[in-house]
Image: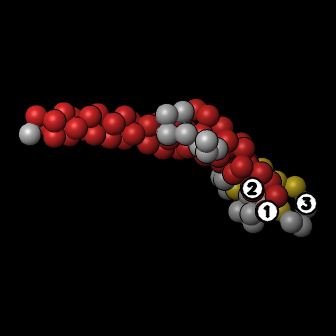
Amino acid sequence: MSILEATKPLYNTVIIYIFSMFLIIYYKPNIMYSHKHKKFKQFGVDHNRTIFTLPIVSILIAIILYLFFSYLEKLHILQKKYDSIVQQINKIN
């Protein structure tokens, strides 16, 4: 059994989301974190502010991950259907 499963997009999303949030908080990218003030930047376009705040980035990551894993689940289902059709055709021949 692997950590990620093709038929569980929500489970996969949560696992990768937690991992990606850990990485963001651990590495504190300059676009989101002010090393001078030792805190995450606030939302805005002024000096020492950013449009890529931690809450916005975390929401975007969650949405993108869920869409990605949902797409993979659909591909997995289609692949299973395709394989069963091919097997049926091979049995006829």
Q: Tags 2 and 1 in contact by the CB under 8 Å rule? A: yes
Q: Pick whichever of labels 2 and 3 is earlier in the sequence.
A: 2
In the structure shown, which secondary structural element does the residue marked by tag 3 occupy?
loop
**Mark 2 surroundings: few (<14), some (14-19) or many (≥20) residues within 10 A:** some
Q: Distance between the residues labelled 2 and 1?
A: 5 Å
Q: Which amino acid does label 2 sit on?
A: Ile
Q: Which of 15 and 36 is in front in this view?
A: 15
Position in image of residue 88 (x %, y %): 18, 33
Task: Indicate which disc residue 81 carries.
Answer: none
For the residue pair 24 and 51, the one nearer the viewer reads as: 24
* Element assignment for label 2: helix
Question: Residue visible at 37% across and 34% down?
Answer: 77
Task: Say which label, 1 or 3, has the lower sequence index.
Answer: 1
Is 77 on the left-hand or right-hand side of 64? left
Report the residue that reaches farthest toward the left: 93
Relative horizontal placement of residue 47, taking residue 9 as reference (left or right): right
Which residue, given by chain and number where applicable, does mark 2 sit on?
Answer: 24
Label 1 SS: helix
Q: Which residue bears the numbered disc 3?
A: 38
Residue depicted at 61% across the width and 34% down the height = 11
Q: Residue at x 80, y 54 (%)?
A: 25
Say which residue label 1 marks. Answer: 27
Which residue is located at x 74 percent, y 55 percent?
24
Name the amino acid type tagged 1. Tyr
Q: At which x and y percent is residue 31?
A: 71, 62
Q: Estimate the spatial distance between the alpha carbons at disc 1 and disc 3, rounded to whole Å.
A: 12 Å
Question: Quarter-wise, where is residue 4 in the image?
Answer: top right
